Image (cartoon, rainbow, N blue to C red):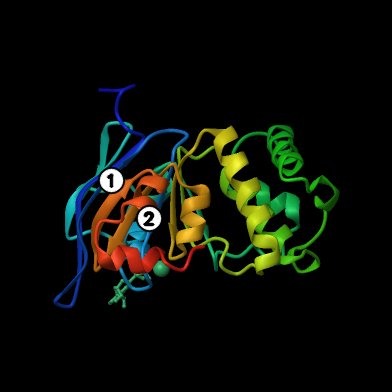
Amino acid sequence: MQGTAPRLEIRNLTRLFGGACVVDDVSLSIKSGQVMCLLGPSGCGKSTTLRMIAGVDMQDSGEIWVDGTLICDGAFTVPAEQRGIGLMFQDFALFPHMNVADNVAFGLKGTRAEKLSRVEELLAKVGLMRLIDAYPHQLSGGEQQRVALARALAPRPKIMLMDEPFSGLDNRLRDGIRDETLALLKEEGTAVLLVTHEPEEAMRMADEIALMRDGKIVQRGAPYNIYNSPADLEAVGFFSDIN
Ligand code: ADP
Ligand code: MG
């Protein structure tokens, strides 16, 4: 099983709020080094799906597997901090009272020298070594985003969950940061589940897109296959904003 198992697999994940089925029988699998985009309109259940994988919400039914090991089946659950998962959310801010070095080192274990070496490695990769002693309020939005990425990747997570991580940035910066982020994720070999409501972002970043609507995955495939052959008229409409 090990070696051939996907890095992350979710099977038949379902979540009810009140009487409503917000995540409805969702199954997905992601390999190391692969970027999967969960793409769909606001309110379709993307963040709820991510929160269950992160371990901050619990499904009503279905299973979550990491490297061929069951980590949560709705009753049994591995705690969030033991799942080897990195998180990057739009409003998942840097710690304002810590400098850049301490922010990036936050989730690291080991000696001071070991931590510093990893911090410097990542800051070099995101091009921010010169800001190692700076505080978050001294950084631009794009710089804060790069530090947040370095912080999330520092402990070498097996899986990275990203929820609309670029939506707080202005258009001018966004494409550049998307490309840099993608390059670094590929270099680290992390399995990535990226949530977005922007087809353009999914087209730019995904190896595979899972199109979500009303809690369900309605189509899955390589970006250009989905773009060229949308499953139905609603999917055509959703993609029609891209030119
Ligand atoms: P998305 O991230 O795709 O915009 P969400 O997963 O945040 O969608 O939300 C999906 C649906 O579930 C929405 O209708 C939202 O209002 C509802 N929802 C999310 N969290 C809760 C909650 N804690 N309690 C009740 N309803 C919720
Ligand atoms: Mg959301």
Coordinates of residue 153 in the picture (x, y in percent): 58, 43
Coordinates of residue 17 in the picture (x, y in percent): 21, 73
Q: Is residue 75 visible?
A: no
Question: Which numbered dot is residue 144?
Answer: none
Point out the quarter of the image occupied by ligand 1.
bottom left
Q: How far apart are marks 2 and 1 (CA)?
A: 10 Å
Residue beneath the point at 78% across and 48% down? 128
Secondary structure under tag 1 reads strand
Q: Name the residue under label 2.
A: 38
Q: Answer few, some or many: residues within 10 Å of disc 2's Cα (few below 14, many 20 plus, some between 14 and 19).
A: many
Q: In this view, does 108 lie to the left or right of 125?
A: left
Q: Nearer the viewer, residue 111 or 68?
A: 68
Coordinates of residue 186 in the picture (x, y in percent): 55, 36
| Mark 2 vs 1: CB contact within 8 A | yes
Q: Answer few, some or many: residues within 10 Å of disc 1's Cα (few below 14, many 20 plus, some between 14 and 19).
A: some
Secondary structure under tag 2 reads strand
Q: Disc 1 marks which amino acid?
A: Leu
Q: Which of 40 and 9 is in front in this view?
A: 40
Residue beneath the point at 71% across and 51% down? 102
Q: Which residue lies most toward the bottom here?
A: 18
Q: Disc 2 marks which amino acid?
A: Leu
Q: Mark 1 points at which residue?
A: 28
Residue beneath the point at 24% across and 57% down? 218
